[in-house]
Image: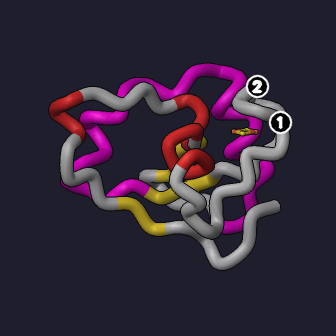
Amino acid sequence: MQIALDNAVPGIDGDCGGECACGTCHMVIADEWFGKTGAVNDAEEQMLSMTPERARTSRLGCQVKTSEDMDGLIIKLPEFQM
Ligand code: FES
């Protein structure tokens, strides 16, 4: 989420500043990359459960810690952030 905001990527709002409290950083990870994004914790699961466009590989961008082995990560953004 922060990388998207720092680089003016449209479609990631990050309204709560990364506190896992708004859901405006929803993204859908490409299947082949989902396993590299780590585990979904309870707070993230709660926010995702309220996300209308949730998919099997949905994550909140603010809860994904990036690393070198995620270079090339493919994500799709929902049409609308909630
Ligand atoms: S920035 Fe608010 S939930 Fe991610």
Question: Quadrant of the image for the N terminus?
Answer: top right
Crowd band around label 2 with a 10 angstrom C-alpha radius: few (<14), some (14–19), many (20+): few
Residue 6 in the image, given as x and y percentages of width and height: 57, 46
Q: Which residue, as the protein is rendered here, is positioned at the far bottom?
A: 79
Label 1: which secondary element = loop
Residue 35 included in the magenta stretch of the image: yes
Residue 55 in the image, given as x and y percentages of width and height: 52, 60
Q: Name the residue nearer the viewer: 35 or 64.
A: 64
Q: Quadrant of residue 19?
A: top right
Q: Is residue 22 above or below residue 63?
A: below
Residue 17 in the image, given as x and y percentages of width and height: 77, 33
- Is 4 placed left or right of 18 in the picture? left
Label 1 CB less than 8 angstroms from ligand 1: yes
* Residue drawn 23% across the image and 39% down it: 70
Q: Name the residue nearer the viewer: 6 or 72.
A: 6
Label 2 CB less than 8 angstroms from ligand 1: yes
Residue 82 in the image, given as x and y percentages of width and height: 82, 61
- The image quadrant where one finds ligand 1 is top right
Residue type at the position of mark 2: Glu
Residue holding disc 2: 19
* Residue drawn 73% across the image and 45% down it: 14
Q: Name the residue nearer the viewer: 5 or 11.
A: 5
**Magenta segment boundaries in residue numbering:** 29-53
Label 2: which secondary element = loop
| Residues at marks 2 and 1, CA–CA distance in whole angstroms | 6 Å
Q: Which residue, as the protein is rendered here, is positioned at the far front?
A: 7
Residue holding disc 1: 16
Q: Are marks 2 and 1 in contact (CB under 8 Å)?
A: yes
* Residue drawn 79% across the image and 50% down it: 50
Residue type at the position of mark 1: Cys
